[in-house]
Amino acid sequence: MTWKAFHNRGEILRAVIATADVRRDGILPLDVPGAGEAFHDELDLLGALMLKWHARMSGHVERELAVQPLDLRAAVATAWARAAEELAGVRAILDHYREQPVDAEMARVIDRAAAKEHQFLAVMAGLSGLGEPDAAAVGAEIERAARLQQGVLTLDARAATDDGPRRASLLDRLRAVVAA
């Protein structure tokens, strides 16, 4: 890929993200000018959006852990929620195609990406190690908590209850700092 093609692909991806943020319908905006030429197919564009999402979410996780090192689970959930707020259109697309993939290959790719994201969330929250069998389930619970915190619910998150751990209040966090 030439530098010009790479640069154009980046511009088109930014236009796709902006369009997705305006529409928030969960459908890939393949009608954005140049999207059909810059991305081979729906899966190629979806992969680029997944990469953008993961980079943004990871950055938020790093920032939250730096300012809230005492409650790692809450920090990671807050980071996920903030990334979802910033990339609301992208998150809607990822959620839509996770629930309704267009084919078996897309379903496989999305399931694998979601499992890796959940493992990442669990590891960053200090609740699991890499490769542990329960890591994906723990990370999925963190995602559900983040969705409840933010109010972004999909079919999976609608089944969640309020029985999970509550987010520590400012007073609780201050007490924890003083106790440490």
Image (spheres, rainbow, N blue to C red):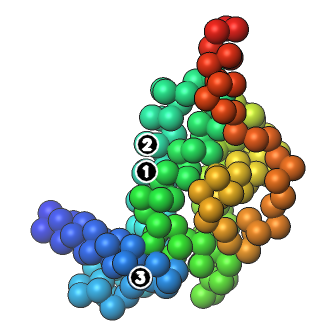
Q: Amino acid at mark 2?
A: Gly
Q: Is residue 6 above or below residue 129?
A: below
Q: Give residue 23's mark.
A: 3
Report the Cα–Cα distance between label 1 and label 3: 22 Å
Disc 1 element: helix
Could you tell me if the residues under marks 2 and 3 are in contact, i.e. CB atoms within 8 Å? no
Q: Position of residue 133 (x, y in %)?
A: 82, 45
Extreme residue toward the bottom, this view: 31
Q: Give residue 133's mark.
A: none
Disc 2 element: helix
Q: Amino acid at mark 3?
A: Arg
Report the Cα–Cα distance between label 2 and label 3: 25 Å
Q: Give residue 55's mark.
A: 1
Tell which tag, 2 or 3, sits nearer the viewer: 3
- Comparing 65 with 98, the one in front is 65
- Comparing 37 with 101, the one in front is 101
Could you tell me which residue is drawn at 68 percent across and 78 percent down? 99
Could you tell me which residue is drawn at 29 percent across and 86 percent down? 32
Disc 3 element: helix
- Comparing 69 with 2, the one in front is 69
Mark earlier in primary sequence (1, 3): 3
Query: What residue is shown with label 2?
Result: 59
Q: Position of residue 166 (x, y in %)?
A: 76, 41
Q: Amino acid at mark 1?
A: Ala
Could you tell me if the residues under marks 1 and 2 are in contact, i.e. CB atoms within 8 Å? yes
Could you tell me which residue is drawn at 59 percent across and 78 percent down? 97
Mark earlier in primary sequence (2, 3): 3
